[in-house]
Amino acid sequence: MRRRALGSLVALLTAHTLSQTGNVVTLFAVPFAVLATGGGAVQVGVASFVATVPVVLGGPLGGVLVGRIGYKRSSILADVVNGVAVLAIPVLALTVGLPFWGLLGLVFVGGLLDTPGQTSRRVMVPDISALAGVRLERSVGFVDAATRLSGLIGAPLAGLLVAAFGPFQALYATAAGFAFSAVVTVLFVAVPPGPVTGEDEPQEGYWGDLRTGFRAVVRDPLLRLLIGMILITNLLDAARSNTLLPLYADQRLGGAGALGWIVASFGGSALIGSVLFGFVAHRVPRRVTFSVCFVLAGGPSLVVFALGLSVPWLVAGSIVSGLAAGSSTRSSAPSSSSGSRRTSGLVSSA
C-alpha cells in the first residue's frame, strides 16, 4: 500500500508539472499572439483580463463541483477542457482564421476549470502523503517545487518556441502538456480510500454548498485576510506577468526569448528555495518567515524592471524573488489535512 501511494504521489506531481508547464506556455504565447496579429497594449490587456476572470470564477464556483464529482475526475476534466480549448486556437488561426473575440472566448473556456484542476491535485496530496508515510510539509513542498519546475521548463521552452516558430505554433506544445497530464492521472494516480468526494457531508445542492463555503470564509478572520492578500497580490502579479512583461519584452528586450530566461530564472530559484526550505520548514516560525519571504517574492523582481536595468539585473532580481517565493509557499503549508473541503476552492492562488 505504501509503495502504491508513493507511486501515486509521484504520478500526481508529474501530472501537475505537465499541466502547469502547459499554463506557462499559454501565458507566454497568448500575448505574443495578440501582438503578432496587429494588436496593441489595449488588446493584450483585454486578453489578460479575460484569462484572469475564469481563474477568479473557477475558484469558488468550481470548488463545489470538485467536491461533487471527485478530485481525480476533476483534475482529468480540467486538463481535457483546457487542452481542447488551447488546441483550437492554433488550429483555427492557421486554417479558417480566428478573430480577436474568438481568441478571447477560447482563452476564457480554457482557464475556467484550471483553478479547480489545481485545487483537486493539491487536495489529494494530504491523503496520499499519509498513506505513503511522507511528511505533509515535504509533500506540499514537492507540489510547490513541481509548480516552480514547470516555470523553469516552460518559460525558456515558450520563449524558444515563440521565437522560432511563432506564438500559435507554440500552443501545440501546451495542448500536448495537458493531454499527457490527463493520461498520467488516469493511469497512475490512485484515489485513496475514504470519503474524498464529500459523501460524508450533508448535501445542500450546488448553490447551498457554495453558500456554506462563503459563510465559512466570511466568519473566519484568518481566511478573510488570506483571501484579501491573495486577491491583491494576484491582481498585481497578473497585470505584471500577463500584460506588462510581454509588452516590455517586445519593446525593450527584443522579444519572447529574453523574457523566457528571466521567468525561468525565477522558476528555477523558486524550485531551489522550495526544496532547501523543506528541510527546515518545521523548525522555523511560519508567520515571520512567510511575511518576510512574501515581501521579497515581489519586491526585487519589480524594482529592477521599474528602474529599466539591463537583462543581467533583471535575472538577478528574479532569482532573489524566486528563492523567497519558494520558501514562502513552504512556510504557509497546512499542518494537517483536516478542515472543511467546501472552502478548498475559495482560497486559491492563481
Image (cartoon, helix red, strand yellow):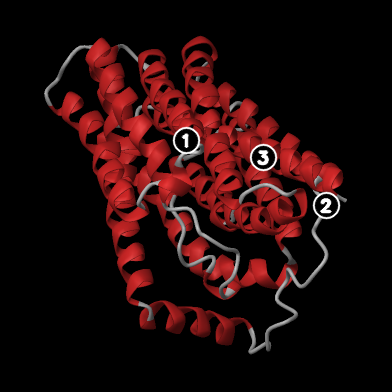
Instruction: Please tell me whether residue 13 is drawn above or below residue 76 in the rendered image.
Output: above
* Amino acid on which disc 1 is placed: Ser
Identify the residue under disc 3.
13
Q: Position of residue 70 (x, y in %)?
A: 73, 65
The foreground one among 182 and 46 is 182
Give me the disc on residue 67: none
Q: Position of residue 346 (x, y in %)?
A: 47, 67
At x 50%, y 59%, the residue is: 334
> In the drawing, does residue 231 fall left or right of residue 169?
left
Of the image marks 2 and 1, the number of the one nearer the N terminus? 2
> In the drawing, does residue 247 fall left or right of residue 208?
left
Q: Position of residue 85 (x, y in %)?
A: 62, 44
Disc 3/disc 1 C-alpha distance (Å): 14 Å
SS under mark 1: helix
* Amino acid on which disc 3 is placed: Leu
Residue at the limit of the structure toward the left, as seen here: 307
Q: Position of residue 102 (x, y in %)?
A: 51, 45
Q: Residues within 10 Å of mark 2 (few under 14, many from 20)?
A: some
